Image (spheres, rainbow, N blue to C red):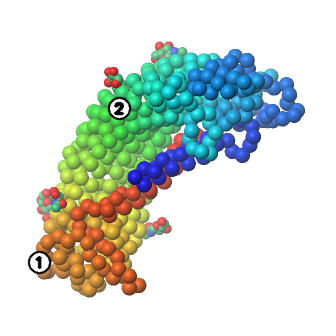
Amino acid sequence: MEHSFSLQTFMLLTLVLCFIPLGNTFTVIIPDSSSPSALVDAPQTGFGLNNNGARTDIREQEAVYDIMRATGNEWATDIQDVCRGRWHGIECMPDKDNVYHVVALSFGALSDDTAFPTCDLTKSFISPSITKLPHLRTLFFYRCLTNNPQPIPSFLGRLGKSLQSLVLRENGHVGPMPNELGNLTRLRVLDLHKNDLNGSIPDSLGRITGLRSLDLSGNRLSGPIPSLSFPRLNVLDLNQNHLSGSIPTTLTNCPSLIKLDMSRNRLSGPIPESVGGLENLILMDLSYNSLSAPLPMSFKNLNCLQALILNGNPTMSTTIPTNMFDGLKDLTILILSEMNLQGIIPESLGRLRKIRVIHLDGNNLNGSIPKNFGDLNNLSELRLNDNMLIGPVPFSRDTIWRMRRKLRLDNNSGLCYDTKSGLGDDLDTLSGSGIGKCGTPQFGIITKQHISSNTGGTHEFIIGPKSAAGRVQQSSVCMMLLQLIANFLLLAYLL
Ligand SMILES: *[C@@H]1O[C@H](CO)[C@@H](O)[C@H](O)[C@H]1NC(C)=O
Ligand SMILES: *[C@@H]1O[C@H](CO)[C@@H](O)[C@H](O)[C@H]1NC(C)=O
Ligand SMILES: *[C@@H]1O[C@H](CO)[C@@H](O)[C@H](O)[C@H]1NC(C)=O
Ligand SMILES: *[C@@H]1O[C@H](CO)[C@@H](O)[C@H](O)[C@H]1NC(C)=O
Ligand SMILES: *[C@@H]1O[C@H](CO)[C@@H](O)[C@H](O)[C@H]1NC(C)=O
């Protein structure tokens, strides 16, 4: 599973980058000027020699001891002043009386390089004393309660005055999301990725109007997606849940969305026309649902969209609107496999100058491959296999060499090559593969062909049924997506 390894590495790297305090020995952080705070924006002198008067608020100190004990980190109770303890994972800030307050707590072994306190997996819990940290802005738990599954404590809702970032990632939580999370009205980041949460998404989240990133992916959340209205939301990730019903039309009230991922749920009904209002959207992934026709005409307004992923919605069963791709000038990844698409491939797709990956395989597309596909200089991966396409393959030898294994044309009705195109001599051997010379009958399926390159080497050109090549292609798309996603994560955590 090399690509799930990359996925993790990517995520971890991203998280690590975001959470390692940058090159200083203090755990003091710079105040965030955008949100009002009781703490002063004084120069951060930390705990230098000339700062002997500073000490940590006593109540908060006791609370930190409790929290550390609850995660199996009893060692911390030997530390005289927790804000001077200098362990990664605690951050403090002074107020104007030089009393230090805890503003961030982080737990979990992100990687060998991060020294956040690890948790005793078998008995850790989140101590209620956390509510005694009135200045806490960031609470981060990663894989902490894994072997001691428990609900997300509702008392976290009492941190509403200060908390801006709540991350309980792969943390072993079960049961429903508490309504009280809606009390955290200052949150910018809510990340509950990959727990075992069930029940529905509480409507109370709607109160968190300043939310920038909402990641509830990888749980067992069910029921409908509540109506959404988050003017500043950049990242909405609900992938891999059991959510049903339709995609809310209120998405348009989230005009700042950059990433929208609702893949791998049980969503039905059409994609609302209102998605066209998401003018900043870069990635839209609605794959593996049961979405139905029509494809929204408003897609063409998504001028920033780079990845459109709708595969695995066999219920879509429609034609691709002729001008669907007209405005998608930044599109680089288009995945529309296995959607029961019919009719022809629109020429507007061949005008997307930046497109690198096109998957239209496993549909019922007919007609021929648009001639202008031959002009797509950045196309490096094309799957048109398992359709009903006919006519000449409009690619030059160079293009075919560029794509090599990432070109899949097998199992169509009558694709052929034009000998005048220069493909002839090289691809003669393809005539037994389902792709013959135009004008001559061709039949049969062969899985591998060898064609010689200019340099005299021999390469496999796989045009047959799914094989190792499929995996290669999959992982290259994954890598591209991961880069995108890593950027989003970075963005989300840096906010
Ligand atoms: C927290 O939320 C609950 C339910 O939404 C509400 O009843 C309660 O008053 C809230 N508490 C605080 C402290 O805001
Ligand atoms: C959530 O899961 C728990 C334990 O598996 C179960 O008892 C409970 O009924 C589930 N709740 C919902 C709303 O599905
Ligand atoms: C292909 O991509 C490169 C960068 O990846 C870009 O500079 C170039 O303009 C693209 N070509 C076209 C035809 O868009
Ligand atoms: C493609 O299939 C549709 C029916 O799905 C049919 O109406 C149309 O004539 C076909 N077009 C071509 C070019 O074969
Ligand atoms: C060929 O493609 C069609 C879809 O157009 C699919 O139903 C069929 O199973 C494919 N045949 C093979 C041998 O893969």
Please give the name of the residue rendered at 68% of the width and 26% of the height, measured from the top-left corner. Answer: 76
Residue designated by label 2: 220
Q: Amino acid at mark 1?
A: Pro
In the image, residue 274 lies at what x, y percent?
Answer: 35, 41
Outermost residue, right direction? 50
For label 1, the SS is loop
In the image, residue 51 lies at what x, y percent?
Answer: 85, 30
Camera-nearest residue between 243 and 47:
47
Crowd around label 2: few <14 · some 14–19 · many ≥20 (10 Å): many
Disc 2 to disc 1: CB gap under 8 Å: no
Camera-nearest residue between 54 and 376:
54
Q: Is residue 255 left or right of residue 57?
A: left
Distance, label 2 to label 1, CA atoms, is: 52 Å
Q: Is residue 413 left or right of residue 167?
A: left
Classify 392 as above or below 99. below
Can you see residue 393? yes
In the image, residue 444 lies at what x, y percent?
Answer: 14, 72
Q: Is mark 2 within 8 Å of ligand 2?
A: yes
Count of picture labels: 2
Q: Quadrant of ligand 2?
A: top left
Please give the name of the residue rendered at 75% of the width and 37% of the height, measured from the top-left corner. Answer: 26
In the image, residue 472 lies at what x, y percent?
Answer: 37, 61
Crowd around label 1: few <14 · some 14–19 · many ≥20 (10 Å): few
For label 2, the SS is loop
| First in sequence: mark 2 vs mark 1 | 2
Please give the name of the residue rendered at 57% of the width and 44% of the height, measured from the top-left corner. Answer: 111
Residue designated by label 1: 441
Can you see residue 416? no
Where, by quadrant of the figure, is residue 37 drawn? top right
